[in-house]
Image (cartoon, coloured by chain):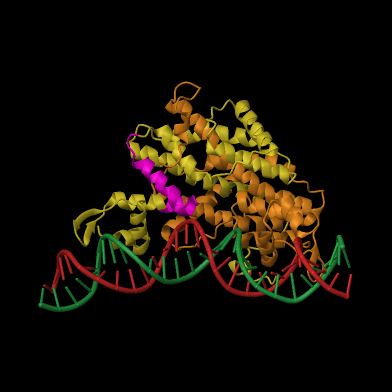
Chain colours: A orange, B yellow, C green, D red
DNA sequence: ATCACTGGATAATACCGCTATCCATGCAGG
DNA sequence: CCTGCATGGATAGCGGTATTATCCAGTGAT
């Protein structure tokens, strides 16, 4: 198919597709002539991957570039691939070597040990979590992550990993890994807020089930 | 304290503090004279709240403005306050009234019903989740959110809500609500990635991930 | 009175994702 | 073959956002 068709099928403007080509997010089409190139289903699929990572996962374009590079690198083991996705998802927390930081990191490592997890020291999520703990303490929030760790531990072990099609072609498995991390991450977050709203309504008593001030809860900016 | 002291204690540059004052994120200090104003602990605390929402929660400044306005509005019930936080957290998904959208929304509503949740139709998380489902289907991912819903449901009911100090002064409770949503949301996400890494290492059982460095972000020559 | 410092107003900056403009093709219909 | 519209590629520009730099007049300690 040609670029215009690719654009039509994906809903991404041509100018934007050109941008992705420039940035190396999308592989070049098969060159037919100086002003003619052909794209196929793989480009369409890649485009959907990009948009999902961008719009749902909120990944910056530079990070997506990393991810697709890893996806395309056939020599990369799946586990490493997952690490790349995690790295792209993590927002580069700057290490301040303060007392608080060390303490928070220690707390995180205790939690990791308590769950029996095996985590490499360079894992981005480790630093990110430590950073979050620092913030929580700054603000005087009670910090108890154990129930959260237990919940995701079960989820990952009992559900998520079983869904990855390890026996499928590599790119399929890889996409499932990356997309699972990103899309289900968002889904989990949205679900949590739904649960919160429901429980909040129940406890703080917007009394009857047929919500009286339904619109108030999500009222648009004043 | 003066602005420079506020800056020193919070780690936020003076110019940035001035910006927050302009934007109404941070209340004005007590004016002592034309070129002299005094700030106190409440400003420091507010500044930390802002930075937490900004850096950890990734909220845009405009959304933070909404949140602090709600926090400061004494007349707002707690439940409504939570709704405001949720609204600020959600990234305004645009409704395309397509077939897929309707179907995804239906699936989300079935899930909500299955869990017995009480959710207002305008809940931002509802649309966000539907959007995510649409993307998942586009990409051919299997979509089964039930285990996720169950996990967060338990978490919210058994842990999160019990931590909110409803009997404390309003602003304390309000901050706990907002920060709980935002900070624990991030924490949950980071924990999930930790669990994934651990489980991935166990199942795919291999060498540790490459601990990619920041320079790699721009290094690869296409 | 002086001078370093403060707070406030305004303009400039950096980055990012995207978009508009140009231009040399290139295929299609006559 | 010739004409004309569409294509792909290169380049420059736009719009939004968070932040920062510049100016300036007022203040208070010395």
- Residue displayed at 69% across by 51% down: A11
Q: Is B186 inside the magenta-drawn segment?
A: no
Rendered-image quadrant of the C terminus of chain A: top left
- Percent across and percent down for residue C3 are 19, 77
- Residue displayed at 78% across by 61% down: A74
- Percent across and percent down for residue B112 are 60, 30
- Residue displayed at 67% across by 41% down: B134
- One can see residue B202 in this view: no
**Residue in the foreground of this view, choosing between A38 and A57:** A38
Q: Is residue B46 above or below residue D20?
A: above
Q: Is residue B200 above or below residue C29?
A: above
Q: Is residue A88 left or right of residue B62?
A: right
Q: Is residue A53 above or below residue B214?
A: above
Q: Is residue B63 left or right of residue B76?
A: right
The segment highlighted magenta reads B51-75
- Percent across and percent down for residue A72 are 75, 61
- One can see residue A177 in this view: yes
**Residue in the foreground of this view, choosing between C20 and A182:** C20
Q: Count the numbered circles shown.
A: 0
**Residue in the foreground of this view, choosing between C21 and B13:** C21
- Percent across and percent down for residue B140 are 75, 44
Q: Is B71 inside the magenta-drawn segment?
A: yes
- The secondary structure that dominates the magenta segment is helix
Q: Is residue D3 left or right of residue B175?
A: right
Rendered-image quadrant of the N terminus of chain A: bottom right
Image quadrant where residue C13 sits: bottom left
Residue farthest to the top, as pictured: A208
Image quadrant where residue A114 sits: top right
- Residue displayed at 70% across by 37% down: B99
Q: Is residue A116 left or right of residue B45?
A: right
């Amino acid at each position: 198919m040609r670029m215009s068709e690719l654009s039509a099928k994906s809903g991404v403007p041509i100018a934007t597709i050109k941008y992705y080509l420039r940035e190396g997010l999308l592989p070049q089409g098969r060159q037919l002539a100086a002003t003619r190139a052909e794209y196929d289903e793989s480009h369409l699929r890649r485009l959907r991957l990009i948009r999902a990572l961008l719009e749902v996962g909120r990944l910056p374009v530079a990070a997506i570039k990393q991810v697709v590079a890893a996806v395309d690198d056939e020599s990369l083991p799946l586990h490493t691939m997952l690490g790349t996705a995690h790295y792209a998802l993590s927002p580069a927390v700057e290490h301040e070597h303060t007392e608080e930081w060390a303490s928070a990191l220690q707390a995180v490592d205790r939690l990791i040990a308590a769950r029996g997890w095996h985590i490499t020291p360079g894992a981005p999520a480790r630093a990110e979590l430590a950073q979050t703990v620092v913030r929580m303490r700054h603000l005087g929030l009670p910090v108890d992550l154990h129930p959260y760790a237990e919940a995701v531990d079960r989820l990952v072990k009992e559900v998520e990993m079983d869904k990855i099609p390890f026996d499928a072609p590599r790119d399929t498995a890889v996409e499932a890994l990356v997309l699972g991390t990103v899309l289900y991450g968002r889904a989990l977050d949205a679900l949590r807020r739904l649960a919160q709203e429901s429980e909040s309504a129940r406890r703080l008593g917007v009394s009857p089930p047929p919500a009286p001030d339904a619109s108030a809860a999500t009222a648009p900016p004043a």
